[in-house]
Amino acid sequence: MREKRKWFVNALLCYLLFLLLVTFLAPVLTPYDPLSIGLAKTLQSPTSVHLFGTDELGRDVLTRLLYGGRVSLTVGAAAMMMALVIGAGFGVVSGFLGGVADRIMMRILDALISIPSILLMIGIQVLIPASLLSVVVIIGMTSWMPIARLIRTEILSLKGETFIQASVVVGASSSQLLTRHLLPQCLPTIIVMSISGVSHAILSEATLSFLGIGIPPHEPSWGNMLMGAQSYLLSGAWWIALFPGILITCTVLAVTYLGDVLQDRFALPQLKKGGR
Amino acid sequence: MTRYIVSRLCEAIVVLLIGSILCFAFIRVLPGDPAAAMYGDQVQKMSQADKIRIAENLGLNEPLYTQYGKWFMGVLQGEWGRSYTTGEDVKTMIAHTIEPTIILIVASAVVTVVLSLFLGVITGLRRYSFLDHAITVASFIFMSIPSFWFALMLMLFFSVYLGMLPTAGMGQGGIGDWLKHLIMPAFVLGLSHIGYYIRILRNHVAVTQEKEFVWALKARGISEKTILWKHIFPNASLPYLSFMGMSLSLTLAGSVVVETLFSWPGLGRLSLKSALAHDYPVLMAVILLSMSIVILGSFVVDLICAWIDPRMRQHLLKEEGR
């Protein structure tokens, strides 16, 4: 059992490294331009020239997948970082202050978590013009709540530990307590949450772009390549929808599974996926 | 118990109030000219005075807190405003769309519960068997698959390739036609979070199975079936139930995607349409309604959990402001 799992983990890591490499090397690997439109060769099914076929504007699907991977992976990492910073900040402050401030902050958190995430995203996207950055901000601003809740719980339980009380007694300042003792103790949680945050962000980017409120259409991303796919799919052009979806699924699967392995390694309790 | 119910109810009301303030403040600061949304291109031909009159009619010139107060009191009295785009009463729009959404969510919940109970218990009892591995892999795949893409693949197979199922709408014919329209959206929504359900149930069944009280029951010669359904299952059902409460928000979010994809005439599709048209009264009503449903849902689930498990009630009473 253990051996099997190790083998699988290595395979997934190789897949992710391979993905990073090919998206990074996209200009070298493909002779086509992801943006140039060729109306003479629209909606061609996969051939040896266009391995994954061409889309409705005659662009090579494989090329767009490689370039789109850059966008999707960047959004995934950046949105996760943003959610992590907001979430950890909110959770630390709330747990550290305690008392009334903590109660009010937790009720605000409850309210935000109760709004279905896509509705929250739909709301925010009206506020900022669509671009890569806006998608990062939207996902970051709507996915930090579970992190905040978890970090707060952790800080609360740490506050009762003897070593923290001892540092208070010897006169450690609040900032020393936070940076030297509390945050390092939360590190395992933060790492696991950040990994599950990446997979959530990649999925959210795909969903938003698919709904037409994410990455603007001219720049390829795995999500917006699927945007028009429904109508072409129904008329039989399956390749436009198939390949981006497979890539999203495999990537999210790899990241999710690695997160799960790490969670076991750190012996963390089952994370609750509330408010997503 | 009464004390717990009351305190939990107060908490829910406070959350709802904060949520309504957030919603209002949030949507109020959004850009977009309501006059333009109402009259389209006509707005360029209007004089400044006309625009001001429109703003006054809509109450947009008053201070924000007055607007909030009026709006909230109105909401409580069933006065939900009119759509900027169609001029229709928001309440009737919601009333027309909520029924399809409830149908879809109930159908998807049936899919989720039936499948996850069966698969979760089986994998929990036979840990590390071939079946367990297969179902674990499958549930990881379902956690990772974007639900809209899963829907597209189902459409490709069942509608394009087999030509069996329709891809849009609710159908107008009899119950058979209606079921045919319902089956794909319900499965997409129901399967979108089934991986979490299966894993929660599997892990808790497996852990409970190795507890000492289960050994004691076995030693006393009580049948496996009785142990499973009378002792293991109730223990494992608590985290399952509380995840159900939490995932109501996920399901409502999922319904936006699924309804848009399958042109299902529900709340989710309405919310996306109204957001794209800058139709704030409708969007605000849908968001507030969804939020209330989620808060009410988690309140009910908490009560059920406390009712099933006395330990949880004690624990929750002691726990300071979660």
Image: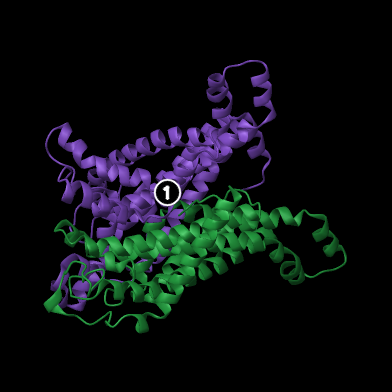
| Residue that extends furthest to the top in the rendered view of this protein | B221
Residue visible at 49% across and 57% down? A256
Image chain in purple: B
Residue visible at 40% across and 61% down? A203
Q: Secondary structure at mark 1?
A: helix
Residue B236, located in which quarter of the rendered image?
top right
Front one among A35 and B90: A35
Task: Estimate the x, y position of residue B283 in percent, counting from the top left.
Answer: 31, 57
| Residue that extends furthest to the right in the rendered view of this protein | A170
Is B122 placed left or right of B191 in the picture?
right
Task: Estimate the x, y position of residue A19 in percent, counting from the top left.
Answer: 43, 71
Say what amino acid the circle numbered 1 marks.
Ser
Location of residue A197 with respect to A131 vertically, above or below: above
Task: Estimate the x, y position of residue B282 in percent, counting from the top left.
Answer: 28, 56
Residue A144 in view: no
Q: How many marks?
A: 1
Front one among A242 and B232: A242
Residue B58, located in which quarter of the rendered image?
bottom left
Location of residue B276 with respect to B196 vertically, above or below: below
Residue A172 in view: yes
Chain A in the picture: what colour?
A: green
Q: Which residue is mark 1?
A: B249
Location of residue A11 with respect to B111 vertically, above or below: below
Q: Quadrant of the N terminus of chain B?
A: top right
Residue A20, located in which quarter of the rendered image?
bottom left
